[in-house]
Amino acid sequence: MTRFTLVLILNLLVVAAVAQPAWSIFRGNQQLTASVDARLPQQLQLLASFQTEDDIKASPVVLGGIIYCGSTDGFFYAFDLNGQLKWKFDAGNSIEAPAILLDGKVIFGSLDGWLFCLNEADGKVVWKYKTDNQIIGSANWYKHGEQSILAVGSYDYYLHGVNLADGARRWKYESDNFINGAPGLYKNAVVFGGCDGFLHLVSLQTGKLVRKIELATYVASSPAIVGQEAYIGDYEGRFFAVNLEQGKVRWTYDNPDKNLAFIASPAVSNDLIVLGNEDRQLYCFNRQTGDLAWTKRLSNRVNASSVIVGDKVVTATMDGLLYVHRLETGEELSTYEIGGQIVSSPAVYDGKIIIGANDGRIYVLGKKVL
């Protein structure tokens, strides 16, 4: 073996070791922090796209170079990074919920209340589970021994616990209003904000309430969880840091002059929290103190959740612009115009941003290799 060949092999091993393996759940991990230690080009370029027949409101997930996402056309799609279809599945109703990829299976909900489990390889149905109203948010999971338990919220007011293996109901936990967002994992429990104005902490093994913490009003977004704390915004523009062990709000951001909704979920990296609001502002908070590190006014309101990629933040607006900002300072680095409204949140995979828009298209953006 020549020295050149050895160096080449070592370089390939290093690349493989640092490559991001997956974005297999909404917000990238079970704690829903939407932050990855990766590099992103300052100026995004279109690499590929995939066209569906209606709006994309679901957020895509990615594994092994395959993108998985549902459309409001009622189909769920699997296609590669070049936009080539692998398979599609007819769910019979609109899909707005992000999928999760777990143990060779794809799990997602639809607007008629079905939770589907498909084979990742070919899109064949493994099982389906019925709730009594629409499913908008992603599921999450907890492994207990050999068994994986899924948790998914529905507009039937219940958080449902479902066995991954066979789709059998494990338990149901009743809240007092719609459950819109995804639950985040904390130890062996999940945390979710309800439209009843509470943050709920529910055991994934039993479905029993561990703790319920009063916030203020409707919570449409999903929490991000770091250590013992959950970070979440509400429908009247307040943002909270909640100690889950003590069951207490540690700090609250509340600007009475700007009380529009936080529909977007937060992204968290080290001591900074970033998310957009319907008031067109992108907010960056100090995680420890709740102080504003910076704010930036964008071109339109923000319903999609930002992602943090290394030292950059990527945010989509309702007029179809994709912004790249510097995380530490909020300096605008670049924009990319998609054109269609964006409520789908970005996935990050292998130095690429993957996002859907209301023109029915899912975009793969990154840096072109010449």
Image: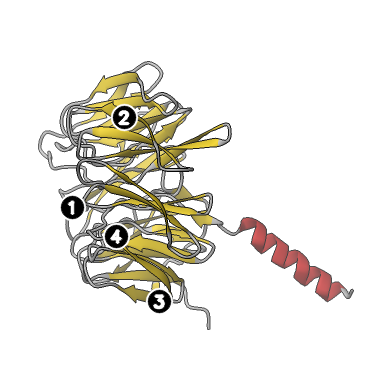
- Secondary structure under the numbered disc 2 in the rendered image: strand
The residue at the point 56 percent across, 56 percent down is: 21
Distance CA(mark 3)–CA(mark 4): 25 Å
Q: Which residue is mark 2?
A: 172
Residue 342 in picture, x, y percent from top left? 24, 61
Residue 265 in picture, x, y percent from top left? 30, 44
Viewer-side residue, 258 vs 63: 63
Residue type at tag 1: Arg
Q: Quadrant of residue 184?
A: top left
* Of the image marks 3 and 1, the number of the one nearer the N terminus: 3
Badge 2 vs badge 3, beta-carbon distance below 8 Å: no
* Marking on residue 91: 4
Residue type at tag 2: Lys
Residue 7 in picture, x, y percent from top left? 79, 69
Query: Where 318 falls versus 201 (above or below)?
Result: below
Classed neighbour count for the residue bearing mark 1: other residues with Cα under 10 Å, few (<14), some (14–19), many (≥20): some
* Of the image marks 4 and 1, the number of the one nearer the N terminus: 4
* Of the image marks 2 and 3, the number of the one nearer the N terminus: 3
Report the side of 4 relative to 98 (left or right): right
